[in-house]
Image (cartoon, grey):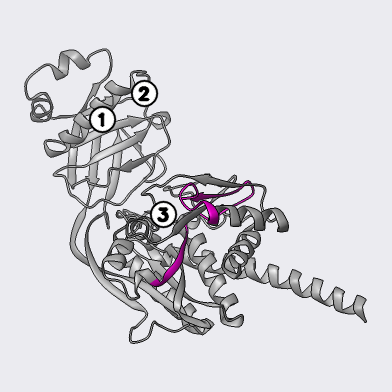
């Protein structure tokens, strides 16, 4: 009989673990599909993704905080690229998102120009002239800054700043040899900057552009807040993750955001399923923030307009980039909350969940930050592994295996239970 029970428990534990990851993969696949437009600010992709999360929470059995709804509404200004996105050099049409990106502050531009390349050989001669960029543009050309072989990092930074300022005068092209990453713009320049991968720029004499931006004032978005009451209702553990991503860059390129951060949303929803079936000691609050990619806007709004008393929060566990923990996890604020960090390490040593738990100091790079600023204990937890796609069109569900997803979730559960 004891043997039968042991076998049953092993099989149950194994099937539950498979169910955790299978469910997470399904959530991630849904959120990364093209119907949510990269969960950004084109076609209200962020809002429709939030509605999807609310439906999941209701199916799981979670409820809003007392006297509230699931949705905390707010607005933000944001620069978007909803339509035309064309770059042709001579007769070569470049692929948006693959061969080039536009700077997130880019304005619109349509037309054909000659190329005036600025490089280490001629930079002093050209830029020493007064109103150099304006003169280039008035002569029917636009500047192409090509400094991929420049070793002087300080000078390179100054040249990039100069190119960014030139967006108020003319369309600008910047040739980049390092990995490119798209972002969300909160401001709008008069003209666009097109950043072309160095390997895709073969020179040329002419360039055609058709770039359409739309600066949206007071875009309506929302945080999603859900709740599981615990035995001690006056104290809460907060799990948080941002669900928004970068949206679209034209009609053909969108950014799925699997690792960043559909994986974190999947972790929260999987935890919600667990706690719905296993009532916790402390009440659990799940915060799904929008606006993270626009500068932590959603979490800042929540902390400034809290739906619960911040002093009653025992701990905030913010998960972002959960795509693959084959090498372990990092805890931002691990150097601050040493006892809590050591508790994570001790649990991991006992259970052998992950190869490594690494500590890191305070940073302002995810939604834990404003909680920390208000004195609320918080960790930002992200995975370490082989998943390297980030802020690009290749951060897809297919490229995000969720390695050791179950182990990370079980570690979080053990930490909260401990």
Give the residue at x 41% y 54%. 255
Instruction: Mark 3: give few (<14), some (14-19) or many (20+) Cα within 10 Å.
Output: many
**Is the residue 229 above or below the residue 291 in the image?**
below
**If you read the primary sequence from the N terminus, does the residue marked by circle 2 or circle 3 appear first?**
2
- Is mark 1 in CB contact (under 8 Å) with mark 3? no
- Of tags 1 and 2, the one toward the viewer is 1
Q: Which residue is mark 2?
A: 148
Q: Which mark is residue 255?
A: 3
Mark 1 and mark 3: Cα distance apart in space:
25 Å
Instruction: Mark 2: give few (<14), some (14-19) or many (20+) Cα within 10 Å.
Output: some
Residue nearest the viewer, comparing 251 with 170: 170
Mark 2 and mark 3: Cα distance apart in space:
26 Å
Picture quarter containing residue 223?
bottom left
Disc 1 element: helix
Give the residue at x 62% y 61%. 411
| Residue 228 percent coordinates (x, y) | 49, 80
| Residue 243 percent coordinates (x, y) | 41, 64
Picture quarter containing residue 6?
bottom right
Q: Which mark is residue 160?
A: 1
Residue 319 lies in the magenta-colored region: yes
Give the residue at x 24% y 26%. 158
Residue nearest the viewer, comparing 126 with 378: 378
Residue nearest the viewer, comparing 304 with 103: 304
Disc 3 element: loop
| Residue 373 percent coordinates (x, y) | 33, 56
Whether residue 101 is visible to the viewer of this picture, yes or no, is: yes
Q: Which mark is residue 317?
A: none
**Is the residue 314 above or below the residue 292 in the image?**
below
| Residue 165 percent coordinates (x, y) | 16, 35
Q: Specify start and end residues of the magenta stretch as a single range.
A: 312-339
Instruction: Mark 1: give few (<14), some (14-19) or many (20+) Cα within 10 Å.
Output: some
């Amino acid at each position: 009989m004891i043997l039968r029970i042991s076998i049953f428990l092993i099989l149950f534990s194994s099937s539950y673990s498979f169910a955790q990851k299978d469910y997470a993969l399904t959530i991630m696949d849904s959120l990364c599909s093209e119907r949510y437009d990269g969960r950004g600010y084109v076609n209200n992709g962020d809002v429709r993704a939030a509605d999807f999360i609310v439906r999941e929470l209701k199916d799981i059995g979670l409820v809003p905080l007392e006297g509230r709804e699931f949705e905390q509404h707010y607005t933000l200004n944001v620069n978007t690229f909803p339509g035309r996105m064309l770059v042709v050099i001579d007769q070569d049409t470049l692929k948006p998102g693959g061969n080039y990106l536009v700077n997130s502050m880019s304005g619109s531009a349509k037309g054909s120009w000659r190329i005036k390349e600025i490089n280490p050989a001629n930079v002093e001669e050209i830029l020493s002239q007064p109103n150099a960029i304006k003169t280039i543009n008035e002569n029917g050309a636009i500047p192409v800054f090509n400094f991929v072989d420049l070793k002087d990092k300080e000078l390179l930074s100054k040249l990039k700043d100069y190119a960014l300022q030139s967006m108020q005068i003319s369309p600008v092209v910047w040739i980049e040899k390092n990995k490119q990453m798209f972002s969300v713009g909160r401001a709008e320049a008069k003209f666009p900057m097109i950043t072309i991968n160095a390997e895709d720029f073969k020179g040329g004499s002419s360039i055609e552009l058709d770039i359409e931006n739309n600066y949206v004032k007071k875009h309506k978005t929302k945080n999603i807040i859900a709740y599981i009451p615990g035995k001690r209702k006056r104290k809460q553990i907060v799990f948080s993750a941002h669900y928004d991503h970068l949206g679209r860059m034209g009609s053909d390129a969108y950014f799925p955001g699997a690792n960043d951060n559909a994986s974190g949303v999947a972790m929260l929803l999987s935890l919600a399923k667990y706690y719905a079936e296993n009532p916790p000691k402390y009440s659990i609050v799940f915060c799904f923030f929008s606006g993270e990619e626009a500068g932590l806007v959603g979490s800042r709004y929540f902390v400034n307009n809290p739906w619960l008393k911040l002093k009653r929060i025992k701990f905030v566990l913010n998960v972002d980039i959960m795509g693959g923990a084959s090498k372990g996890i990092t805890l931002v604020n691990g150097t601050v909350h040493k006892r809590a960090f050591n508790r994570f390490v001790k649990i991991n040593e006992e259970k052998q969940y992950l190869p490594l738990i690494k500590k890191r100091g305070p940073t302002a790079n995810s939604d834990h930050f404003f909680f920390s600023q208000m004195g609320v204990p918080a960790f930002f937890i992200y995975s370490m592994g082989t998943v390297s796609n980030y802020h690009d069109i290749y951060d897809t569900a297919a490229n995000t295996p969720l390695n050791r997803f179950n182990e990370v979730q079980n570690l979080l559960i053990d930490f909260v239970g401990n």
